[in-house]
Amino acid sequence: MRIASRMLLASGTTSPRVGGVGECTIHIIEDECQVEDLCQKIEAMSTDNARWEFFRRDAAMLRDADAVLLITSLRCKTDPADTNCNMCGRLTCEYLKEAESLPEEAGVAYRGPLCIFRANNISYAVDGIVSQARNLGIDYGVFWSAGAAAMRMGILPKNTGFALAVAISITEKSPFRDIPKKYEEINESTMNDRIIKRLWPQFRSIYS
């Protein structure tokens, strides 16, 4: 898994960019406790917005992931491309620079405003990761919920305006495909096992 995740990182890093300029960063989360922290944040966010109920299912799938790669877009919020492409819905990039961000509220995932031209660069990195995963025969899933949760946790660069996550799994059955409707309830045992595994060394040190 560690070898595979670094190969995916390399593929995402070397994927083409608009203008050939590095605007994305890729971060690997492979520690079980860190993955669980991310999952718990995703679950907590599921109640922040009525449309985010599926976050609980995403968290259940991510608990079965061997590693999570977080891909960021660094310049889409702070540095519009000055191409006047109008993809953001504004006439010129100067209007985007003057637009206010959404309030920092629980039900807001990405505060924006974002330069869509620059944010699209993240798709090249994701494509590089996904393509390499297919070549290696590794199961994967792409999650925007995990990207938003990672931003809210403050584990990504401060100037990140947009982030996505690619979870990978090297098991007989992909945890990201053909899952039951109430997968978060069925898969609750995984969460309990991880919490016990995290707390057991502390109990052992106290009572030994």
Image: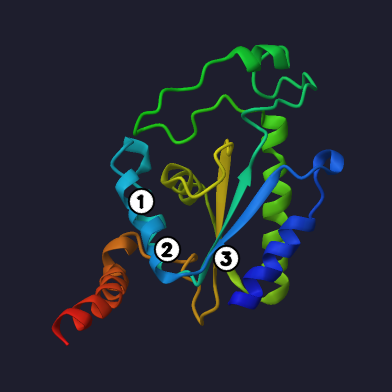
Which amino acid, mark 2?
Gln
Residue 28 lies, in percent from the top left, at 57, 62
Image coordinates for residue 165, horizontal then vertical, percent:
55, 54
Left or right: 146 with respect to 185? right
Quadrant where the N terminus is found in the figure: bottom right
Task: Tell me: 201 left or right of 12.
Answer: left
Q: CA distance from mark 3 to mark 1?
A: 20 Å
Q: Please state which of the two labelled residues, at mark 2 or mark 1, is closer to the viewer.
A: 2
First reached walking from the N terminus: tag 3 or tag 1: 1
Q: Residue furthest bottom?
A: 208
Give the secondary structure at mark 2: helix
45 and 74: which one is in front? 74
Quadrant in which the C terminus appears: bottom left
Residue drawn at x 71%, y 52% as measured from the top left: 125
For label 1, the crowd category at 10 Å Cα-Cα, with few meaning under 14, some 14 to 19 and many 20 or more, is many
Distance of label 2 from label 1 (alpha carbons): 11 Å
Q: Position of residue 75 (x, y in %)?
A: 67, 34
Which amino acid type is shown beneath numbered disc 3? Tyr
In this orientation, which residue lies closer to the viewer: 72 or 107?
72
> Could you tell which of marks 2 and 1 lies nearer the N-terminus?
2
Q: Where is mark 1, residue-wise?
A: 41
Give the distance between the C-alpha atoms of the residues marked 3 and 2, in whole angstroms: 18 Å
Q: Quadrant of residue 185?
A: bottom left
The mark closer to the camera, 3 or 1, is 1
Q: Residue 195: image x %, image y %?
A: 27, 70
Colouring rule applied to residues: rainbow
> With respect to residue 170, does 90 lie above or below?
above
**SS at mark 3 in the image:** strand
Badge 1 element: helix
Relative depth, front residue between 197 and 64: 197
- Residue 15 in the figure: left or right of residue 178: right
- Residue pointed to by mark 3: 140
